[in-house]
Image (cartoon, rainbow, N blue to C red):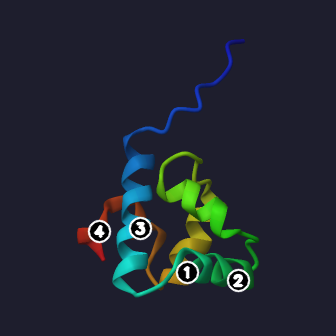
Amino acid sequence: MAARSLEIGPAGMLVARTIGILRTERGLGQRQLAAWCTALGRPMSNMMLSRIELAKRRCDIDDLVAIAEALQVSPATLLQGPGAA
């Protein structure tokens, strides 16, 4: 079986951009948002969040749900883009 590509696809790129936009709109730093995700039960460092926003790390479903909850939006909003908020 061939190794699975780690390339971030278009949906992942949209999620990454949307997280950064919504975080900035809410006046949150990466460290603060990562701390909120950790408090919600999904341990996350600001480096992990930075890599997600830069599309250098995949945002798995557990990350997506925790980040959405911390940003007070639905996970679907992160998948649909900043205009959906």
Marks 2 and 1 in Cβ contact (< 8 Å): yes
Q: Is residue 64 above or below residue 70?
A: above
| C-alpha distance separating marks 2 and 3 | 19 Å
Which structural element holds mark 1? helix
| C-alpha distance separating marks 3 and 1 | 15 Å
- Find disc 3 in the rendering and name its residue: 20
Q: Quadrant of residue 4?
A: top right
Q: Residue at x 45, y 48 (%)?
A: 12
- Find disc 2 in the rendering and name its residue: 40
Relative depth, front residue between 31 and 68: 31
At label 2, counting other C-alpha atoms closer than 10 Å, the crowd grade (few under 14, some 14-19, many 20 or more) is few
Which structural element holds mark 4? helix
Sequence-first tag of 4 and 1: 1
Q: Residue at x 41, y 67 (%)?
A: 20
Marks 2 and 3 in Cβ contact (< 8 Å): no
Residue 61: percent from the left, percent from the top?
61, 58
Kindly identify the amino acid type of the residue bearing the numbered disc 2: Leu
Which structural element holds mark 3? helix
Sequence-first tag of 2 and 3: 3
| C-alpha distance separating marks 2 and 1 | 8 Å
Kindly identify the amino acid type of the residue bearing the numbered disc 4: Pro
Residue 17: percent from the left, percent from the top?
37, 59
Relative depth, front residue between 2 and 53: 53
